[in-house]
Amino acid sequence: MDGAEVLDVARAAIWLTVEISAPILIAGLVVGVAIGLFQALTQIQEQTLVYAPKIVAIFITLLIFLPMMAALMKKFMEQIAQRIAAM
């Protein structure tokens, strides 16, 4: 395996990490911004108010996107196994 193939595998692994983490991070971001906007509009400055809705949103996002995440990881593992078998 030469340097170009190693960089290709590393690039694919980083892109896979972005694809897997994006739905969870986006859900956390949207809920955080919505709660922040709610706090600014109502002048409620409770720091712990954001945690419960964010945890629920991330849990629901995980339930929805877990099959997609597993499929992406399976596809990546199959590609890695094919590269190992081709050596």
Image (tube, rainbow, N blue to C red):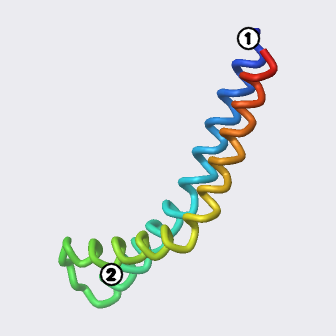
Q: Quadrant of the N terminus?
A: top right
Q: Residue at x 67, y 52 (%)?
A: 72
Q: CA distance from mark 1 to mark 2?
A: 51 Å
| Quadrant assignment, res 11 | top right
The residue drawn where x is 70% and y is 35% is: 12
Give the mark nearer the N terminus: 1 vs 2: 1
x and y percent of residue 82 in the render?
77, 30
Q: Secondary structure at mark 2?
A: helix
Query: Where 22 sits versus 74, above or below?
Result: below
Q: Is residue 80 above or below residue 39?
A: above
Name the residue type under label 1: Gly
Mark 2 Cα within 10 Å, few/some/many (few <14, many 20+)?
A: few
Give the vertical position of 79 relative to 56 (above or below): above
Q: Is residue 76 left or right of residue 46?
A: right
Could you tell me which residue is drawn at 50 percent across and 72 percent down? Answer: 63
Residue lying at the far front in this picture: please name it: 85
Relative image position of residue 49 (x, y in whole percent): 24, 78
Residue linked to disc 1: 3
**Left or right position of 50 against 5:** left
Q: Residues within 10 Å of mark 1 (few under 14, many from 20)?
A: few
Q: Which residue is mark 2?
A: 40
